[in-house]
Image (tube, grey):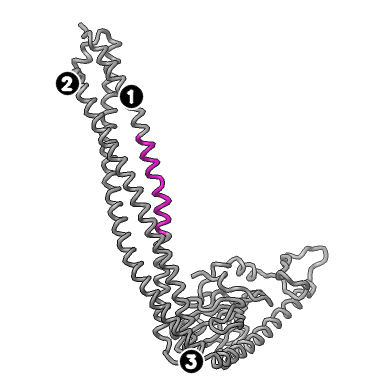
């Protein structure tokens, strides 16, 4: 005989299931939306950490260079330029630390919001789960499931009750899993919140230390600037000597490159012998006329090596393992003397004493020259491109030698007056000077 209240039991619990399923779906959507911002945030955090580590390494290197620089009067300008570089690096590091602190604070706020939301979800789901179980036991649906099925008025009703109990059992397991998952996420976010708090504390300590170091360096810079201002005559004489040495080197480089280009142009103009009635298999030459030029016949066509070298823009290795660019490419103001511009055909890289210099690409040695003031200079040809390595204390290469990328070609010389070790590096495309900083990647 069927239980008269069994239909009511079934309808009541079924209605509860229908009402709770949408809330579960809504919970999943809310949790997903709360967790989404952290994917992009974690990536930005990693980028900032990488930038901070890189800046710290550069500052350590610059600081090491400063300690090696002598405290003599002649080395004052060199110390000033190195200190100026370090101050810029320190300011970038402080800006990066401030960004990291802001990110950490944002992360703490977001985690607090997620923790609060997850806590409410856990409480709501536990309350709902308990109410559902109490209702089921009160109606004896779960206390004796077999009796609940056998008390059905018909076979069809028994089958529907069996299907209902299966659905109910599956929902109960899912609800328990959802509670466990939410509790796990709550614990994870709580741990992340504590990590953000520790990170922020460490960053604040680091920031304070960097700000103190910066104030000290700025004071040292002012003292050096006063010393340099009172010694302008000597600085002008030194600058003239350096410019004379660089100009002499520049003429030598231009002469060699112009001769190399002339030979390639003449070679390209020679007619290619071919069998009558048969097309030549030689690929057509690609024009390599630099921008701003008017006579393309003065420039050699691009060959395979030139085209491959061009593809390496921004990917060429540094010519030394460690260092920083102390002087950039092009025309720039003198750091201390007013109304004086300095034109740099390449870049100057401050590095360790006796640092090994390596070729940045496969090539042929077109020139090995020793000049007072610039020591050894090596010119490597890479098709229609050329790289210059100047201020080498030693080298074993000779003109005509073939070198491979990253092959050692010499060692940087160290100034006996200032104690600085600096490589002068240039990059040419035929007769056109290029900025090496846009071609090399550390």
Along the polypeptide, which appears first: circle 1 or circle 3? 1
User: Which quarter of the rendering shows the N terminus?
Assistant: top left
x, y percent for residue 324: 48, 76
Considering only vertical position in the picture, is 437 above or below 104?
A: below
Along the polypeptide, which appears first: circle 1 or circle 2? 1
Numbered range of the magenta stretch: 27-46
Question: Can you tell which of label 2 and label 3 is closer to the viewer?
Answer: 3
| Circle 3 SS class | helix
x, y percent for residue 421: 47, 85
Q: Which residue is mark 3?
A: 74
Question: Can you tell which of label 1 and label 3 is closer to the viewer?
Answer: 3
| Circle 2 SS class | loop
Q: Which residue is mark 1?
A: 19
Residue 271 in which image quadrant:
bottom right
Q: Which residue is mark 2?
A: 143
The residue located at (34%, 30%) in the rendering is 23
Camera-side residue of 235 and 313: 235
């Amino acid at each position: 005989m069927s239980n008269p209240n069994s239909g009511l039991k079934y309808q009541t619990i079924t209605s509860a299931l229908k009402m709770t399923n949408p809330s579960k779906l809504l919970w999943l959507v809310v949790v997903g939306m709360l967790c989404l911002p952290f994917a992009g945030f974690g990536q930005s955090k990693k980028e900032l950490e990488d930038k901070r580590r890189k800046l710290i390494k550069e500052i350590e290197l610059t600081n090491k260079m400063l300690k090696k620089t002598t405290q003599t009067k002649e080395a004052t300008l060199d110390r000033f330029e190195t200190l100026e570089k370090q101050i810029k690096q320190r300011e970038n590091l402080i800006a990066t630390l401030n960004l990291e602190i802001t990110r950490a604070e944002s992360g703490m706020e977001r985690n607090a919001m997620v923790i609060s939301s997850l806590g409410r979800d856990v409480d709501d789901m536990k309350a709902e789960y308990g109410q559902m179980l109490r209702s089921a036991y009160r109606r004896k649906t779960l206390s004796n499931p077999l009796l609940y099925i056998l008390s059905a008025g018909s076979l069809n009703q028994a089958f529907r009750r069996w299907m209902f109990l299966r659905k109910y059992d599956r929902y109960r397991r899912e609800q328990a899993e959802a509670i466990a998952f939410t509790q796990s996420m709550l614990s994870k976010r709580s741990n992340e919140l504590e990590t953000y708090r520790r990170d922020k504390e460490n960053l604040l300590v680091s920031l304070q230390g960097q700000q103190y170091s910066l104030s000290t360096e700025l004071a040292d810079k002012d003292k050096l600037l006063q010393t340099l201002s009172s010694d302008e005559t000597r600085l002008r004489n030194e600058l003239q000597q350096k410019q004379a040495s660089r100009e002499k080197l520049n003429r030598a480089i231009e002469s060699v490159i112009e001769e190399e280009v002339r030979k390639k142009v003449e070679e390209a103009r020679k007619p290619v012998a071919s069998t009558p009635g048969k097309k030549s298999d030689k690929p057509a030459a690609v024009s390599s006329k630099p921008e701003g030029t008017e006579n393309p016949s003065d420039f050699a066509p691009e060959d395979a090596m030139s085209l491959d070298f061009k593809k390496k823009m921004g990917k060429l290795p540094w010519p030394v393992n460690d260092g920083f660019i102390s002087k950039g490419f092009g025309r720039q103001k003198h750091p201390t003397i007013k109304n004086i511009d300095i034109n740099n055909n390449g870049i100057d890289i401050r590095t360790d004493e006796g640092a090994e210099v390596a070729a940045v690409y496969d090539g042929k040695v077109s020139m090995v020259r020793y000049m007072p003031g610039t020591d050894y200079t090596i010119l490597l040809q890479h098709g229609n491109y050329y790289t210059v390595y100047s201020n080498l204390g030693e080298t074993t290469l000779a003109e005509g030698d073939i070198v491979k990328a990253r092959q050692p070609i010499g060692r940087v010389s160290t100034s006996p007056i200032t104690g600085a070790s600096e490589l002068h590096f240039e990059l040419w495309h035929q007769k056109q000077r290029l900025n090496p900083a846009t071609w090399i990647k550390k």
